[in-house]
Image: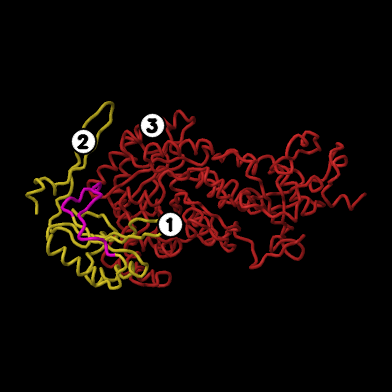
Amino acid sequence: MNSPVDLGVITDLKQRYKGGVLKYRQMGYWRPDYEPKPTDVICLFRITPQDGVDAEEAAAAVAGESSTATWTVVWTDLLTACDDYRAKAYRVDIVPGTGPGTERETQYFAYVAYDLALFEEGSIANMTASLIGNVFGFKPLKALRLEDIRVPVAYVKTFKGPPTGIVVERERLDKFGRPLLGATMKPKLGLSGKNYGRVVYEALTGGLDFTKDDENINSQPFMHWRDRFLNCMEAVNRAQANSGEIKGHYLNVTAATMEAMYERAEFAKELGSCIVMVDLVIGWTAIQSMSEWARRNDMVLHMHRAGHSTYTRQKNHGISFRVIAKWLRLAGVDHLHAGTAVGKLEGDPMTVQGYYNVCRESFNPQDLARGLFFDQDWADLKKVMPVASGGIHAGQMHQLLHLFGDDVVLQFGGGTIGHPAGIQAGAIANRVALEAMVKARNEGVDIEHEGSAVLRAAAKWCRPLEQALETWKDVSFNYTSTDTPDFVATATVSV
Amino acid sequence: MRVTQGQFSFLPDLTDDEIRLQVDYAIDRGWALAVEHTDDPHPRNTYWEMWGLPMFEIKDGAAVVYEVNACRKACPGHYIKVNAFDNAHGVESTVMSFIVQRPDDEPGFRLDRQEAAGRQVRYTTHAYATEQPAGRRR
């Protein structure tokens, strides 16, 4: 047909708005000349177009469907400053390792810029309704993934962020210079309130800083939530008196309604708990409400990312966890499960370090090897304490400390409760392993390579650690990660 | 009992040489060092007594070990800790803290319970070390 017009933006108003269907790029959603403004939100999408849909049109369609476009031309656009409100796809790169000559079908990284005026201040619900709304079901794409996002400082400043943050949490707990230790109570379902509190008591008295409800402990027939709270706080207070240290148990206040969550959170506060937790499945609005509550009540807010793997794990479709982590830092949580790299759950080590950087740094420089595509200035927003949990044990202490440093909660659930000499022994083993490793690192020992020797030396005088090392010596989860960064040192632009 | 506050309470007590190595780690990072002591090890006792001012921009870790020993001599029955402080933007807080002296006899804590409405209990942690009036403690 009339191909010269086909490829470019139609600028003639009569042509542009005469009714019918145009290509998205003809409508102005593909703008290779566009320079993103410092106040723009920038999204990086991984696009797998349907056969016959070219990269630029697919990118333009994503920009259109995540901003102002609908499937046909509407004259009412002319009642608005529509050029400002249109998102602009301005760059498309072929994803390294995909396309002709590779084993994977062709995918593209598409960069899309959104004007700040498109978003309501301080609302993750509003931002996500645009960026991951209708567009993810759009037929001309086989698959779509939101890989990364740059949130401009102007928008960051409309969010309150974590109610407590790493620095203040440490000051409240009086714990500095080492990772914190935690454990999730097991079995996660079925224990009575009294027996559940027993596990909390043993783990905290043995030497852990925190214990944790699991994501699906709410108020089931075997244990009413009030019974759980009362027994856990007895355990926390006893353990504090036994050790002279501040202890905490993440009381899961996740419930069916906001009213029920507030009721549970208020009860946790009345009982003197320093921390409550919610699950990611409660949704963005509920998370922001609980963050406000935590801020009002001096409470640390722990986030368990239950459900995220349904959309974060597959590389071709969904949302990268680094984007979820960014939204959660804005929404305002204090703890966030961000992976272990060495444990039982999905996580390429460099990719996981990228999530940790999102949680903890004041400024994330672009770091393609860790999956970070953009510089991100956090504008003094507080820092989120990442949590490493899932299939880790004392024998990996040197790897964990080397990978993640001091500002992390290391959670050994099975690795505490499954200790052959009991829960207290399991907690002692973990704490001794941790302190010995931190001390050795500070003394200049190369723990990445000599960490095993540090553990063995400590095990000579600490029988519980010796037993732990013996019990789990061969446990590792060496599976190939499904989600790894795709990059080459200098990405080439294909236009 | 053994109060397990600080970074290294689950390990054998640090020798002066080991303290020096930790201090050097802090100095290498440009952190300030401080010595603090108390006779009240309650977990919520935020403000221990300062043994002089924090030492900013020191070059030689021996100075810190010297102050630890001076504090030990003056307060033989107290808990003493070494803190490192990082004044970098975005931290501006304590980044290391470890106990370098503790009393020979650590009497520990009593947990007092006040039964309240419903099944609620109000808890108070009572440090036996503070049973004597402050003026009569050593």
Residue A132 falls in which quadrant of the image? top right
Q: Nearer the viewer, residue A74 or A206?
A: A74
Q: In this image, A69 relative to B130: left or right?
A: right
Query: Do the residues under discs 1 and 2 have CB atoms within 8 angstroms?
Result: no
Q: Which mark is residue A30?
A: none
Whole-percent x, y for residue A124 in the image: 56, 41
Q: Are marks 2 and 3 on the same chain?
A: no
Query: Which numbered mark, 2 or 3, is in the foreground of this view?
Result: 2
Taking the spot 20% from the left edge, 41% from the top edge, the residue there is: B111
* SS at badge 1: loop
Query: Which numbered mark, 1 or 2, is in the foreground of this view?
Result: 2
The mark that comes first in sequence, 3 or 1, is 3
Taking the spot 38% from the left edge, 41% from the top edge, the residue there is: A299
Q: Say which amino acid is labelled 1.
A: Ile
**Magenta stretch: residue A77 in it?**
no
**Magenta stretch: residue B42 in it?**
yes
Q: Which residue is mark 1?
A: A392
Whole-percent x, y for residue A357 in the image: 50, 57
Q: CA distance from mark 3 to mark 1?
A: 30 Å
Chain bearing tag 3 is: A
Q: Which residue is mark 3?
A: A224
The chain assigned the colour yellow in the figure is B
Q: In this image, B72 relative to A153: left or right?
A: left
Decide: is A105 above or below A305: below
Q: Which residues are magenta?
A: B38-55
In which quadrant of the rendered image does the C terminus of chain A lie? Answer: bottom right
